[in-house]
């Protein structure tokens, strides 16, 4: 049975609507999955009391962290978006659907998260330090218009190849 090597337990793909899901990378951490409904205060007719009503929903930026590898998909996507004219942005380049697969220790899909209308708003690479043994990390922040948990059709299914190599390392 294939097993995951290392600590990267989150596989992230993007879908621009034309070429299907493209692997963005395997990440060691995913953060920023927050939702918040703003509270709107509404004065009642007698002006003595204030009602609180739900307002707009805000979503936090999804923060992905991983060690550097041979792939450049995250940096390439950020480069494509940062070079666009915002007034003439192409939806497939600017906004994409992002899927985050949470993988268990046996390389099975545990949970799937869909992030809608996502685009990279910040890309950061750690400082290079020849005196440090820490891994070189890259961080990608993704702005979005919402996220949701999706049902996993077959929880025993392995993620599609080429995500898992013959020895099980991602």
Image (spheres, rainbow, N blue to C red):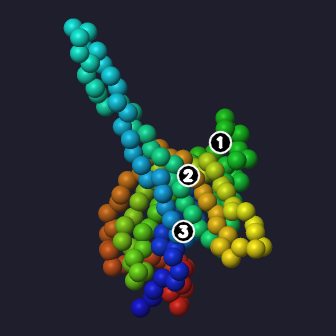
| Residue where numbered disc 1 is placed | 89
Residue 64, disc: none
Instruction: Identify which residue is drawn at 41% across, 60% down.
Output: 113
Q: As drawn, is 24 to the left or to the right of 148?
A: right
Can you give x and y, in whole percent of width and height, for residue 88 in the image?
67, 38
Determine the CA span between mark 2 and mark 1. Answer: 17 Å
Vertical order, 56 against 61 (above or below): above
Crowd class of label 3 (few under 14; some 14 to 19; many from 20; radius 10 Å): many
Can you give x and y, in whole percent of width and height, for residue 131 in the image?
76, 74
Q: Which is nearer the eye, 78 or 53?
A: 53
Q: As drawn, is 116 to the left or to the right of 129?
A: left
Crowd class of label 2 (few under 14; some 14 to 19; many from 20; radius 10 Å): many
Instruction: Identify which residue is drawn at 69% across, 62% down.
Output: 126
Instruction: Identify which residue is drawn at 47% across, 77% down.
Output: 160
Mark closer to the chain start, 1 or 3:
3
Determine the CA span between mark 1 and mark 3. Answer: 28 Å
Crowd class of label 1 (few under 14; some 14 to 19; many from 20; radius 10 Å): few
Q: Label 1: state its secondary structure.
A: loop
| Residue where numbered disc 2 is placed | 142
Mark closer to the chain start, 3 or 2:
3
Q: Label 2: state its secondary structure.
A: strand
Vertical order, 26 against 39 (above or below): below
Mark closer to the chain start, 2 or 1:
1
Instruction: Identify which residue is drawn at 45% across, 44% down.
Output: 59
Determine the CA span between mark 3 and mark 2. Answer: 14 Å
| Residue where numbered disc 3 is placed | 27
Can you give x and y, in whole percent of width and height, for residue 36 in the image?
38, 41
Can you give x and y, in whole percent of width and height, for residue 140 in the image?
60, 57
Q: As drawn, is 135 to the left or to the right of 112?
A: right
């Amino acid at each position: 049975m294939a097993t995951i090597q290392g600590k990267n337990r989150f596989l992230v793909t993007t879908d621009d609507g034309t070429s299907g899901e493209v692997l963005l990378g395997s990440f060691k951490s995913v953060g920023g999955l927050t939702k918040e409904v703003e509270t709107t205060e509404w004065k009642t007719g007698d002006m003595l009391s204030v009602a609180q009503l739900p307002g707009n929903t805000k979503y936090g930026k999804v923060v992905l962290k991983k060690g550097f590898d041979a792939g450049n998909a995250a940096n390439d996507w950020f480069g494509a978006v940062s070079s666009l004219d915002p007034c003439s942005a192409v939806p497939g380049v600017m906004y994409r659907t992002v899927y985050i697969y949470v993988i268990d220790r046996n390389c099975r899909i545990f949970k799937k998260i869909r992030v809608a209308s996502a685009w990279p708003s910040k890309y950061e690479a750690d400082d290079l330090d020849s005196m440090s043994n820490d891994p070189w990390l890259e961080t990608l922040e993704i702005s979005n218009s919402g996220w949701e948990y999706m049902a996993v059709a077959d929880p025993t299914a392995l993620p599609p190849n080429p995500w898992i190599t013959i020895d099980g390392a991602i």
